[in-house]
Image (cartoon, grey):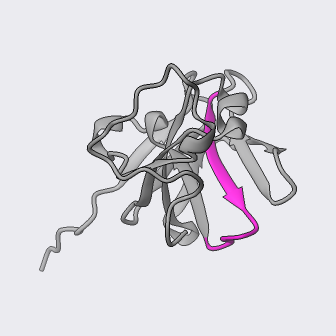
Amino acid sequence: MTTTPTNPTLKGGCFCGQVRYEVTGTPFHETNCHCAICRGTTGAASVAWFSVDRSQFRFSEGEPTRFKSTRRGTRGFCSNCGTQLIFETDDYPGEVDVTICSLDDPESVHPKDETWISSKLGWVVLDRRLPQHRSGAIGR
């Protein structure tokens, strides 16, 4: 008997291809973050993320360089091209956050809210269809 997985594997990696990953679980906490730390570590106006259980995420090629961006948070990026791939926090040790736009198909995961809008740039236009949170998302 052949079974079909309920969640297809999501694949992604950095711009140059040196670091690749696979996600076998269902993404959750899909958000577009406007915090100053995300902006500063990417050079972008905001960063779209999703979370996944750590056991359902693995690097399939290469390993990212890790940077401790806050007392409790570490970011993983490609040491060759600089693409930020993941965020890990001591607050949620069983999860890993993955940048949506590092997916091979970034259209496959959509942000479900806008977070840290209290620190968004004035010229950024929010998606008014999404719930907005002045700080982190409710329940996170």
- Residue in front for this viewpoint, 82 or 63: 82
Which stretch appears magenta?
Answer: 83-94
Q: Is residue 85 magenta?
A: yes
Query: Image height check: is 41 above or below 33?
Result: above
Say left or right for 123 vs 77. left
Q: Is residue 134 at all visible to an observer of this figure?
A: yes
Q: Give the residue drawn at x 37%, y 47%.
A: 111
| Residue 13 point in image, percent of width and height | 52, 36
Say left or right for 93 vs 46. right
Q: Quadrant of residue 105?
A: top left
Q: Is residue 105 at all visible to an observer of this figure?
A: no
Q: How many marks?
A: 0
- Residue in front for this viewpoint, 51 or 2: 51
- Residue in front for this viewpoint, 9 or 45: 45
| Residue 119 point in image, percent of width and height | 63, 38
- Residue in front for this viewpoint, 1 or 100: 100
Q: Give the residue drawn at x 59%, y 51%.
A: 59
| Residue 57 point in image, percent of width and height | 53, 60
Identify the image quadrant of the N terminus: bottom left
| Residue 83 point in image, percent of width and height | 62, 29
Say left or right for 90 vs 23. right
Identify the image quadrant of the C terminus: bottom right
Query: Image height check: is 95 above or below 107?
Result: below
